[in-house]
Amino acid sequence: MLARLRRAAAAARAPLRRAAPGSPGGVRLSHAAPRAAAGRPAEDGCAEEQEGCCRLYPGHIPTSPLQKALLAAGSALTALYDPYRHDMVAVLGETTGCLVLPSLRDKMKHDPEGYRILQERPRIRLSTLDVNRLRGLPDGTLGREYIRFLEDNKVSPDTRMPAKFVDDEELAYVIQRYREVHDLMHTLLGMPTNMLGEVVVKWFEAIQTGLPMCVLGAAFGPVRLSARKLRVLATELLPWAIQSGRNANCILNIYYEQRWEQTVESLREEIGIFPPPAVRV
Amino acid sequence: MAAGLCPCWALLGGRRGALRALVRPARGLAAAKETHFGFQTVSEEEKGEKVYQVFENVAKKYDLMNDSMSLGIHRLWKDILMHKMNPSPGTLLLDVAGGTGDIAFRFINYVRSIRERQLQRKLKHHQNLSWQEIADSYQEEAVKPLGDSQVVVCDINKEMLKVGRQKAQHLGYSEGLSWVVGNAEELPFDDNKFDVYTIAFGIRNVTHIDLALQEAYRVLKPGGRFLCLEFSQVNNPLLSRLYDLYSFQIIPVLGEIIAGDWKSYQYLVESIRRFPPQEEFKAMIEDAGFLKVDYQNLTSGIVAIHSGFKL
């Protein structure tokens, strides 16, 4: 209902918007954010007008196709050169994902749990997680293992970059959800955040989502691995990751926030992920 | 539609946006006075804070970004500024908004080489020098390599000054250099103190340019020179379109890739468009009391050096 209202507002404003050419973002209106309709003189409203293409969600930066291409190329090279530039990996995902994200979103829409996620738009953040409660859960449950993963690898869900260059509000949420679920993937697959673990998770995600960024990461990530790790990857981890990826249901269709008490094993079985091989990663 | 094709318009949208921003503020002008922050309209207090944040964010990668955005040409521009200034040893320079020290270091190099040449010439003109006299002249050069020249680098942003001080240490500049935190609109210096006042790529970020010009007039000695190196209006229409395309399409992308910060570089290119053109800025400088005001376009007006004297 709300989406329909927004679309109507956008359509009403579309002729005016189209009359102003020459903006970096071009003219594109699928869903207009409510704040644009309010026309506040705050920076969001003004910037939105001058861009010619409105800010569809907080943090949205409208970009032209040329800019997207340059961003994709530049971020790919930078991420390869310095894998610790996580922001570049994120930008690569956003700028190359435009063809794949709609089909991912449709996969979510056609699944009841996925549809609920799209409606309710849960976000995984330290402020929304009850960390103490999760830590108190028994070992082997998703919540406990997730917290253990965060603490062992010294990562936090809050360091995930918000989506910036996706020109559709719902797809921006889809990619945001994918990013936030990535840590849970590590937990479910039992992979740490070192280079080898990341490559394995990327392979799994590449098969699951088809996002070009995952495919590129999967293809080029191994370049930085030592020979021994490459062997382990090729002989044990990859076959398992590929089989699991093909067998498993869409990982974005699980409402993880409602399954903290479920054990990791049972969740793996439910999704279709095979038990990880017994190698040290 | 995410997968739609966005036509890539030429970047005159920037100017269009500027006009719209000028027309719009009728509703917001009740209490706070409003000004521009790039193509946005903000209150005057907000602008100062936002500019501070921009430079706090970009400080560490400032020099790298300058080289990438201008393909190294900014070094030539600054060299030309120094040649125009042609300082002699003993000059007291105030470099405002001089954060990372580019102008200050060039000044020191310039004055040092002039000084060396002076001493060499002095040596040549003296015939039949005793060894003692030759040793004394080397001593003089060692003790006063800059010949009492000094440069004060003043910047409102502590992060930029920090980067500048680190650079100075790294490059070995120590003498004749001081670093002061200060606001160009209200300089922490007495009247009639400096021989030369420079502001390179800084004045367009000042909220009240007229106040900065008045302060420049105040702190300069009579006979002192005002020099401003700043982005300006391109006079060639073809180059102007290419420049716009480059500024709005490429520079924010470079900012995102190199510095991880799109918005600061978007602000930078927008602020260039908001700055008054050469003649208008010349008139502003004259209004502050400077005489013999003139400007020199560099690279077809991408950059201009404005000069004026306090007479």
Image (cartoon, rainbow, N blue to C red):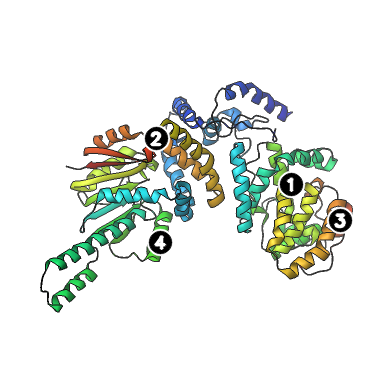
Seen at 25% across and 49% down, the residue is: B85
Structural distance between the alpha carbons of marks 4 and 2? 32 Å
Q: Is residue B268 left or right of residue A269?
A: left
Question: What residue is shown with label 4?
Answer: B167
Seen at 24% across and 41% down, the residue is: B308
Q: Which chain carries label 4?
A: B
Residue farthest to the bottom?
B131
Asked if marks 4 and 2 fall on the same chain, the answer is: yes
Query: Label 3 amino acid?
Result: Gln
Query: Label 2 amino acid?
Result: Val
For disc 4, the neighbor class at 10 Å (few under 14, some 14 to 19, many from 20) is: some
Query: Label 4 amino acid?
Result: Lys
Question: What residue is shown with label 3?
Answer: A243
Whether pointer 3 and pointer 1 mark residues with C-beta atoms closer than 8 Å, the reply is no
Q: Which chain carries label 2?
A: B
Q: Is residue A17 left or right of residue A211?
A: left
Structural distance between the alpha carbons of marks 2 and 3? 60 Å
Asked if marks 4 and 1 fall on the same chain, the answer is: no
For disc 3, the neighbor class at 10 Å (few under 14, some 14 to 19, many from 20) is: some
Structural distance between the alpha carbons of marks 3 and 4? 54 Å
Seen at 66% across and 63% down, the residue is: A154
Question: What residue is shown with label 1?
Answer: A211
Asked if marks 3 and 1 fall on the same chain, the answer is: yes
Q: What element carries label 4?
A: helix
Front of the two marks 2 and 3 = 2
For disc 1, the neighbor class at 10 Å (few under 14, some 14 to 19, many from 20) is: many
Asked if marks 2 and 3 fall on the same chain, the answer is: no
Q: In which quarter of the image is the C terminus of chain B?
A: top left
Query: Nearest the camera: B191 or A29?
Result: A29
**Residue A63: quarter of image:** top right
Question: What residue is shown with label 2?
Answer: B234
